[in-house]
Amino acid sequence: QVQLVESGGGLVQPGGSLRLSCAASGSISEINVMAWYRQTPGKQRDMVARIGSDDSTDYADSLKGRFIISRDKNTVSLQMNSLKPEDTAVYYCYAEIRQTYRIYSNNYWGQGTQVTVSS
């Protein structure tokens, strides 16, 4: 049993910053990729940033330079700077996790956290 619990969402003014965190817990043997996605009503869930077990990172092209993903053991964080109204979305944590005594990894999602950028 694995859980991803997100924190840090909220309301911020344009140009402001926000930091999201996601902690994975449970019977975890190994975590491969951790990532953040976001989704707005009526649209598909898009990748924001991901980070591998070797700390290699990948970002959506439109977000490079403003968002920074990092991880520490079973926690992944997303530092969001210079926020714009179009960054308003529900942000979801994602992780590929191999549970204890399992051979294969499974994909897990957090419950989502709302980020609203508005004056």
Image (cartoon, helix red, strand yellow):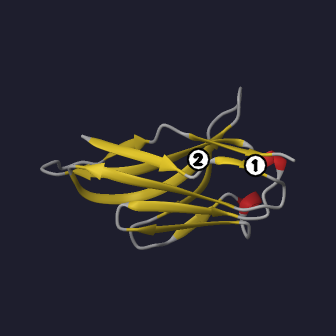
Task: Give left or right: position of 106 versus 17.
Answer: left
The residue tagged 1 is: 87
Q: Position of residue 39 (x, y in %)?
A: 65, 38
Residue 32's place in the image compared with 53, above or below, is: above
Q: Position of residue 51 (x, y in %)?
A: 49, 64
Mark 1 in CB contact with mark 2 (< 8 angstroms): no
Q: How many marks?
A: 2
Question: Which three-letter amino acid code belongs to the residue tagged 2?
Answer: Tyr
Task: State the residue at coordinates (70%, 35%).
Answer: 40
Task: State the residue at coordinates (61%, 48%).
Answer: 9
Task: Give left or right: position of 94 versus 84.
Answer: left
Q: Position of residue 70 (x, y in %)?
A: 51, 68
Task: Give left or right: position of 54 versus 90.
Answer: left
Q: Position of residue 83 (x, y in %)?
A: 78, 57
As drawn, the label of residue 96 is none
**Which quadrant, please, contains the N terminus?**
top left
Task: State the residue at coordinates (83%, 47%).
Answer: 85
Determine crowd level at label 2: few under 14, some 14-19, many 20+ residues with C-alpha closer than 10 A: many
How far apart marks 1 and 2 lie (CA) works out to: 11 Å
Between residue 97 and residue 66, name the one nearer to us.
66
Q: Secondary structure at mark 2?
A: strand
Residue 108's place in the image compared with 63, above or below, is: above
Determine crowd level at label 1: few under 14, some 14-19, many 20+ residues with C-alpha closer than 10 A: some
The residue tagged 2 is: 37
Q: Farthest residue in the right direction?
A: 119
* Quadrant in the rendering for residue 89: top right
Q: Nearer the viewer, mark 1 or mark 2?
A: 1
Q: Farthest residue in the top direction?
A: 42
Question: Which three-letter amino acid code belongs to the residue tagged 1?
Answer: Asp
Q: Secondary structure at mark 1?
A: helix
Task: State the residue at coordinates (76%, 58%).
Answer: 62
First in sequence: mark 1 vs mark 2 = 2
